[in-house]
Amino acid sequence: VSCARILSRLAAAKGEWPDLVRQAEALEQDAKGIGAFEMWVSACASKAHTFARLESRLTLARLAALFLDHRQATGSYPQSIDALIGAKDLLDPLTGGPFALRTEGEWLVLYSRWQGPEKQAVEWRLPAAT
């Protein structure tokens, strides 16, 4: 796996993000201690992570829109993601699996179960009050 190959796949990576990010991380580990090449590979892996998080946030935005539409139509949010029509097709590009849902104080939080090394949350918050 080369950095050039990983970068060339970024544009067509829909649905492949978990594998692509793992490959970028493995390449980054292999390049440790190789000087300037290590910095170049690290930048490549960072771009893969950035694109994957962006794709995940865009998918979360579509899921949040479904939640808001449901609330507008029924007066309340659905009790789960599975109960929402159309949500089963919105898988998390970072994990390949479904997003998760939790209540946090006055917020309904839709989030990715992915945990990257930088611990940046990939989530979307909706006001829980109806």
Image (spheres, rainbow, N blue to C red):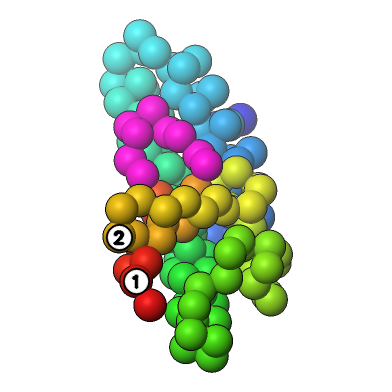
Tell me the quadrant of the picture where the C terminus can be found.
bottom left
Magenta portion: prevailing SS class: loop
Residue that carries the numbered disc 2 in the rendered image: 106
Q: In the shown orientation, is residue 122 left or right of residue 106? A: right
The image position of residue 12, as x and y in percent, is 60, 60
Q: Is mark 1 on a helix, strand or loop?
A: loop
Asked whether the viewer can see residue 108, the reply is: yes
Q: What residue type is labelled 2?
A: Glu
The image position of residue 46, as x and y in percent, is 37, 38
Residue that carries the numbered disc 1 in the rendered image: 129
Residue under the point 65% across and 48% down: 96
Q: Is mark 2 on a helix, strand or loop?
A: loop
Is residue 62 shown above or below 26?
below
Q: In the shown orientation, is residue 25 left or right of residue 89? A: left
Residue under the point 54% across and 82% down: 70
Is residue 2 shown above or below 103?
above
Labels 1 and 2 touching (C-beta < 8 A) = yes
Residue under the point 34% across and 60% down: 107
Tell me the quadrant of the picture where the N terminus can be found.
top right
Is residue 16 shown above or below 128?
above
Is residue 93 shown above or below 35?
below
User: Foreground: 35 or 11?
Assistant: 11
Q: Tell me where the magenta segment starts and ends, as one range.
A: 113-121
Residue under the point 40% across and 60% down: 108
Q: How many labels does the image show?
A: 2
